Amino acid sequence: MVKGYDDAAWEASTELRKNWPKVFRTDPTIYNDIGQILDKEFSHLNCSHFECLGAGGFNICFRMNYTNDSAAIIRFPMPGGVMFPQEKVRNEFSVMQFLLEKPTGTD
């Protein structure tokens, strides 16, 4: 029996979703590239530690700690995990921006 295109696409997507966290954590080129992105973005700070925080159902997160006790986090949405990944990232950014602008200790 020949599989239909949808079946083949579904299998490929399932395989990608199953393996993508491992690829991010174990491929030294990708891991190094992510570290370089954060290092370049925050070049005025000195990195003290870089790590993969883990993968959830929809994202994988990396954190870079700096010697001044600050940190930066970068998140990558899972390919095929969400229907509209660009919209997802925009919405998450909007929430983060709101939280950044909201004074602490207010309701």
Image (tube, helix red, strand yellow):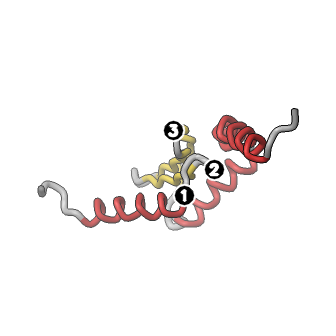
Q: Amino acid at mark 1?
A: Pro
Question: Label for residue 85?
Answer: 1
Disc 2 designates what residue? 79
Q: In the structure shown, which secondary structural element does the residue marked by tag 3 occupy?
A: loop
Query: Reading the chain from its start, which is encountered first: label 2 or label 3?
Result: 3
Relative height, residue 87 to residue 64 (above, below): below
**Residue ID for mark 3:** 56
* Circle nearer the N terminus (2, 1): 2
Question: Nearest the camera: 3 or 28?
Answer: 3
- Of badges 1 and 3, the one in the foreground is 1
Q: Secondary structure at mark 1?
A: helix
Please report whichever mark, 1 or 3, sits nearer to the chain's N-terminal start. Answer: 3
Residue at the (70%, 42%) spot, across then down: 10
Q: Nearer the viewer, mark 2 or mark 3?
A: 2
Tag 2: amino acid: Pro
Residue 33 screen position, x and y as percent: 68, 56
Which amino acid lies under the numbered mark 3 shown in the image of this protein?
A: Gly
Specify the quadrant of the image occupied by residue 23.
Answer: top right
The dot on residue 23 is: none
Residue 31 percent coordinates (x, y): 67, 48
Evaluate if marks 2 and 1 touch, with contact meaning CB atoms under 8 Å apart.
Answer: yes
Q: CA distance from mark 2 to mark 1?
A: 8 Å
| 12 w.r.t. 107: above or below | above
Locate the N terminus and report the quarter of the image it occupies: top right
Question: Where does the image place residue 101, in percent across and percent down from the top left?
Answer: 26, 66
